[in-house]
Image (cartoon, rainbow, N blue to C red):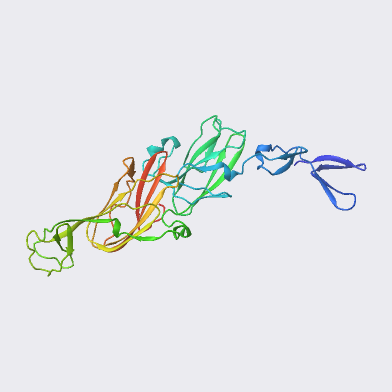
């Protein structure tokens, strides 16, 4: 407030912002110059009150946090920090999101920021801090794509509507580590019921030390006891050629304890979208160097090009299988050993 020049008892006081005077019966009253205030009801949160230009104004506006909504796969909590506690979307092909103007692959949060009441997008509207955005003149919102390169990184996004500005801080939960309290609410399931072995007659001429061989009776395969170096009888012994995991559900950790000595295939399920994405974790004990293949049960989905192509040899592998759907682009990605957002 600039304050006004006033005269009291013949004395002039310049640029007085407020006056405190005693009240009848004791106490004080403060009178403030509000002539240069420019807030309107829509600028003040609903239910809150303020004095503007000498009059009491009751707010009708929405708090900033309430004006931000997730487009897909994120959940935004209220408060100064808008924290994504769900799964950000992985952009595998930036051309799918050309409308936002983004060009890089990576992890993004897609959100919609509504304007204050009475404000609309104009030709002067701009957004800083986001990797890309959509601002259509005449609309009452902007859509932003906020990129995250590391776990728990914060990104500040400022919207200049032309007549005023808004600032929002986004914080993305590490996709791989996630919130441990959230994860602890889920059980660890044994994956045996979700695994199917594929067998084929061995091509070995002699039994190899440490390698598993099986005999077949009908459709039942039984682990055989063999002597390393001995000749393999023709058409008698089988080896694993593949193990397939299928039928698993979202947001669950699965553990498969048996040592895997062949390539691995994971059949990625069709997800009934609810806007929060999906994940499941698979713990595998791998012997030797084995390949990983991801297959899709949803014909409209695809696997990110930078998903893990191979498993770590002779080690327990922890695979995070992560799903996101933004604007109809359904993407699965596999991250080995819980690597962070990168």
**Quadrant hosting residue 236:** bottom left
Would you place residue 253 above or below residue 331 in this image? below
Q: Residue at x 40, y 60 (%)?
A: 187
Viewer-proximal residue, 293 or 5?
A: 293
**Quadrant hosting residue 316:** bottom left
Q: Residue at x 51, y 31 (%)?
A: 136
Viewer-proximal residue, 125 or 290?
A: 290
Q: Residue at x 68, y 40 (%)?
A: 59
- Check the image and name the residue furthest to the right: 9
On the rendered image, what quadrant is the N terminus found in?
A: top right
Horizontally, is 41 left or right of 232 in the view? Answer: right
Horizontally, is 315 left or right of 86 in the view? Answer: left
Image coordinates for residue 273, horizontal then vertical, percent? 41, 44
Would you place residue 106 above or below residue 238 in this image? above
Horizontally, is 270 left or right of 69 in the view? Answer: left
Image coordinates for residue 88, horizontal then vertical, percent? 44, 48
Total label count?
0
**Quadrant hosting residue 231:** bottom left
Image coordinates for residue 71, horizontal then vertical, percent? 48, 41
Image coordinates for residue 108, horizontal then vertical, percent? 44, 45
Q: Residue at x 64, y 40 (%)?
A: 61
Horizontally, is 334 left or right of 198 in the view? Answer: right
């Amino acid at each position: 407030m600039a304050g006004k020049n006033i005269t009291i008892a013949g004395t002039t006081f310049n640029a007085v912002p407020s006056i405190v005077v005693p009240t009848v019966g004791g106490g004080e009253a403060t009178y403030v110059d509000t002539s240069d205030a420019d807030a309107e009801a829509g600028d003040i949160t609903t239910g809150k009150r303020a004095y503007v230009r000498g009059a009491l104004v009751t707010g009708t506006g929405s708090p900033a946090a309430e004006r931000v909504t997730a487009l897909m796969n994120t959940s935004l909590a209220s408060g100064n920090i808008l924290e994504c506690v769900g799964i950000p979307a992985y952009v595998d092909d930036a051309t799918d999101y050309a409308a936002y103007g983004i060009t890089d692959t990576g992890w993004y949060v897609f959100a919609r920021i509504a304007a204050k009441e009475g404000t609309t997008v104009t030709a002067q509207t701009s957004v800083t801090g986001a990797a890309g955005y959509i601002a259509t003149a005449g609309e009452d919102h902007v859509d932003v794509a906020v990129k995250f390169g590391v776990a728990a990184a914060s990104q500040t996004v400022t919207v200049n509507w032309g007549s005023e500005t808004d600032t929002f801080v986004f914080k993305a939960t590490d996709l791989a580590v996630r919130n441990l309290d959230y994860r602890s609410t889920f059980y660890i399931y044994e994956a045996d019921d979700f695994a199917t072995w594929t067998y084929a007659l061995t091509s070995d001429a002699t039994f190899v030390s440490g390698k598993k061989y099986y005999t077949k009776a009908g459709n039942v395969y039984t682990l055989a006891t063999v002597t390393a170096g001995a000749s393999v009888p023709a058409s008698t012994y089988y080896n694993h050629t593949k193990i397939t995991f299928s039928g698993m559900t979202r947001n669950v950790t699965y553990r498969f304890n048996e040592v895997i000595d062949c390539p691995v295939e994971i059949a990625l399920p069709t997800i009934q979208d609810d806007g929060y994405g999906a994940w499941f974790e698979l713990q595998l004990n791998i012997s030797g160097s084995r390949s990983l293949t991801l297959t899709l049960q949803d014909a409209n989905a695809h696997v990110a090009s930078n998903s893990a192509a191979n498993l770590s040899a002779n080690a327990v592998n922890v695979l995070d299988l992560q799903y996101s759907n933004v604007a109809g682009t359904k993407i699965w990605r596999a991250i080995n050993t819980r690597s962070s957002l990168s």
